[in-house]
């Protein structure tokens, strides 16, 4: 009977590793938000550049063709898309490293009672269900962001 409990505890602990997945989803969503913001800024710059180009062509209508061609060359620069660095550069290696949250216990510890073990398992199950809900929400948010990007 204790072997079955040990196996179930190990399974619960394995499922707790999904917390790292939620952290990854959080990082991905922040990176995607940054990309979306950059795209919006670029679109605003493009519309402003187009408007200034129209204004320049209207004001320089009486000028020679040389001045209009040089203004066209100058106006083309804002239309270039800014380079977006790869995602690998945005995430620090320090953020990826997993550090243990608990220190190793060096002193011998008394065996927990059955009641304490059951209470701990109940709390673990509650945390796991919360984590799974959060993971589903994050997956939904990522799908929405992907739809927006497409």
Image: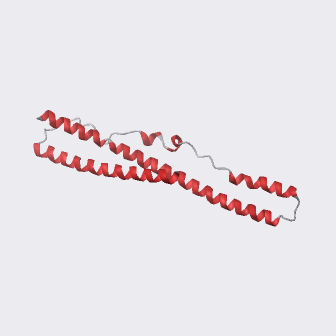
**In this rendering, does residue 108 appear at all?**
no
The mark total stands at: 0
Residue 20 at what x, y percent from top left?
Answer: 36, 43
Q: Residue at x 79, y 62 (%)?
A: 57
Residue 9 figure quarter:
top left
Residue 51 at what x, y percent from top left?
Answer: 71, 63
Q: Residue at x 28, y 41 (%)?
A: 15
Q: Residue at x 87, y 55 (%)?
A: 66
Q: Residue furthest right?
A: 64
User: Is residue 15 placed above or below 66 in the rendered structure?
Assistant: above
Q: Nearer the viewer, residue 78 or 47?
A: 47
Residue 147 at what x, y percent from top left?
Answer: 48, 52
Q: Nearer the viewer, residue 49 or 149?
A: 149
- In the picture, measured across the screen, residue 38 lies left or right of residue 101, that is right
Q: Is the image coloured rainbow, by chain, by secondary structure, or in one colour?
A: secondary structure
Residue 63 at what x, y percent from top left?
Answer: 87, 62
Quadrant, the N terminus:
top left
**In this rendering, does residue 122 appear at all?**
yes
- In the picture, measured across the screen, residue 138 lies left or right of residue 84, that is left
User: Is residue 95 placed above or below 106 in the rendered structure?
Assistant: below
- In the picture, measured across the screen, residue 140 lies left or right of residue 51, that is left
Q: Residue at x 31, y 52 (%)?
A: 133
- In the picture, measured across the screen, residue 122 lies left or right of residue 17, that is left
């Amino acid at each position: 009977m204790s072997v079955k409990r040990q196996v179930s505890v190990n399974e619960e602990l394995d499922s707790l590793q999904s917390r790292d997945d939620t952290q990854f989803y959080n990082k991905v969503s922040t990176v995607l938000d940054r990309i979306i913001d950059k795209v919006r800024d670029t679109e605003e710059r493009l519309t402003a550049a187009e408007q200034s180009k129209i204004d320049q062509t209207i004001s320089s209508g009486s000028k020679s063709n040389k001045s209009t061609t040089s203004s066209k060359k100058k106006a083309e620069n804002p239309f270039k898309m800014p380079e977006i660095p790869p995602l690998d550069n945005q995430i620090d290696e320090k953020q990826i490293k997993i550090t243990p949250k608990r220190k190793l216990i060096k002193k011998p510890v008394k065996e927990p009672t059955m009641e304490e073990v059951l209470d701990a398992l109940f709390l673990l199950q509650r945390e796991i269900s919360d984590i799974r809900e959060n993971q589903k929400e994050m997956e939904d948010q990522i799908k929405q962001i992907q739809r927006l990007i497409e």
